[in-house]
Image (cartoon, grey):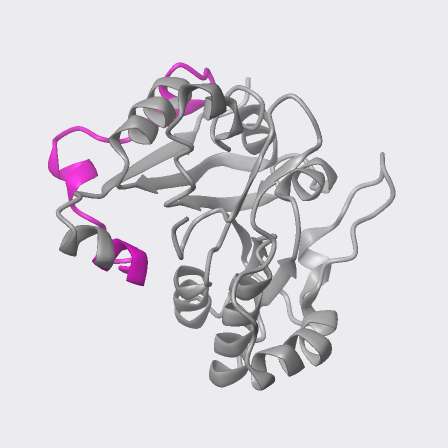
């Protein structure tokens, strides 16, 4: 399991969430943040059939709201939030240690533009209104390498329509992985989806991480181990 991945992967055919919910015991400060800070940042999902207003989650108006599905230990989300204070950030992650890691950075950096869904991302996506998200990230997700587990991968036929629905026209969907099996899977399914267009025009477009896309600890470990990450950017095509 990667430290910047979707630590619990979602079954495409059921409501079951696969993967760990908790790892090593939390240190005292992180336990305290779970008890005190998380309730302030946790998103209260509406009843089934009702919509969530993402802009209303934040204390001050934001020019856009961005979403990270499976923020792992939170390094990427915290980096983006710190450099984009006029953007509201929603992160979904079921792994309690990852949630505690993000809370630590939110507290240390006094980030006021982060909200958290500490669970499955699908109910959150289903509650968001159409065209309400300006950018989405699914980075270094669990590759589920065994063939029989392929339908547990988040990017696929079940969740791409969810993402397409909530993304604004022209919004970016950013995907990354160091597992070539998962890269091929995500590329195949996203390229053939009618609502997404791959922006790559040359090899450097997927081999080189853009300047506004920070390296994470997991990425650095992957490179040190000889694995080459792939960075993919798609845009949401305009609605008819």
Viewer-nearest residue: 223 or 41: 223
Q: In the image, residue 50 lies at what x, y percent?
A: 84, 40
Q: How many marks?
A: 0
- Predominant secondary structure, magenta span: loop
Q: Is residue 76 above or below residue 175?
A: below
Q: In the image, residue 39 lies at what x, y percent?
A: 74, 71
* Residue 208 on the magenta segment: yes
Q: Is residue 109 above or below residue 195?
A: below
Quadrant location of the C terminus? top right
* Residue 32 on the magenta segment: no
Instruction: Say which residue appears at 56% left-offset and 75% top-offset.
Output: 26
Instruction: Say which residue appears at 66% left-offset and 55% top-offset.
Output: 117
Report the magenta residues as a range: 191-220
Instruction: Say which residue appears at 54% left-offset and 37% top-offset.
Output: 168
Looking at this rendering, what residue extends furthest in the front direction? 24
Q: In the image, residue 207 lies at what x, y percent?
A: 16, 40
Taking 98 as reference, is 225 left or right? left
**Quadrant of residue 100 in the image?**
bottom right
Viewer-nearest residue: 155 or 63: 155
Q: Is residue 150 above or below residue 216?
A: above
Taking 206 as reference, is 148 left or right? right
Viewer-nearest residue: 187 or 62: 187
Q: Is residue 31 above or below residue 198?
A: below
Taking 120 as reference, is 6 left or right? left
Viewer-nearest residue: 176 or 96: 96
Q: In the image, residue 161 lies at what x, y percent?
A: 57, 24
């Amino acid at each position: 399991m990667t430290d910047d991945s979707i630590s619990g992967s979602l079954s495409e055919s059921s409501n079951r969430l696969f993967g760990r919910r908790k790892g090593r015991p939390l240190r005292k400060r992180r336990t305290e943040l779970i008890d005190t800070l998380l309730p302030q940042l946790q998103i209260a999902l509406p009843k089934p059939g009702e919509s969530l207003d993402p802009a209303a989650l934040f204390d001050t108006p934001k020019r856009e709201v961005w979403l990270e599905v499976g923020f792992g230990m939170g390094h990427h989300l915290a980096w983006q939030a710190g450099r984009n204070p006029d953007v509201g950030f929603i992160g979904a992650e079921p792994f309690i240690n990852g949630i505690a890691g993000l809370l630590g950075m939110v507290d240390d950096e006094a980030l006021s533009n982060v909200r958290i869904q500490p669970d499955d991302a699908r109910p959150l996506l289903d509650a968001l209104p159409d065209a309400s998200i300006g950018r989405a990230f699914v980075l270094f997700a669990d590759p589920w390498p065994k063939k029989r587990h392929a339908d547990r991968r988040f990017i696929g036929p079940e969740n791409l329509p969810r993402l397409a629905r909530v993304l604004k026209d022209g919004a970016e969907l950013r995907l990354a992985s160091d597992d070539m099996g998962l890269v091929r899977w995500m590329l195949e399914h996203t390229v053939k989806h009618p609502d997404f267009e791959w922006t790559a025009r040359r090899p450097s477009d997927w081999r080189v991480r853009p300047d506004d896309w920070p390296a994470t600890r997991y990425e650095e470990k992957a490179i040190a181990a000889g694995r080459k990450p792939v960075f993919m950017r798609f845009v949401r095509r305009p609605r008819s």
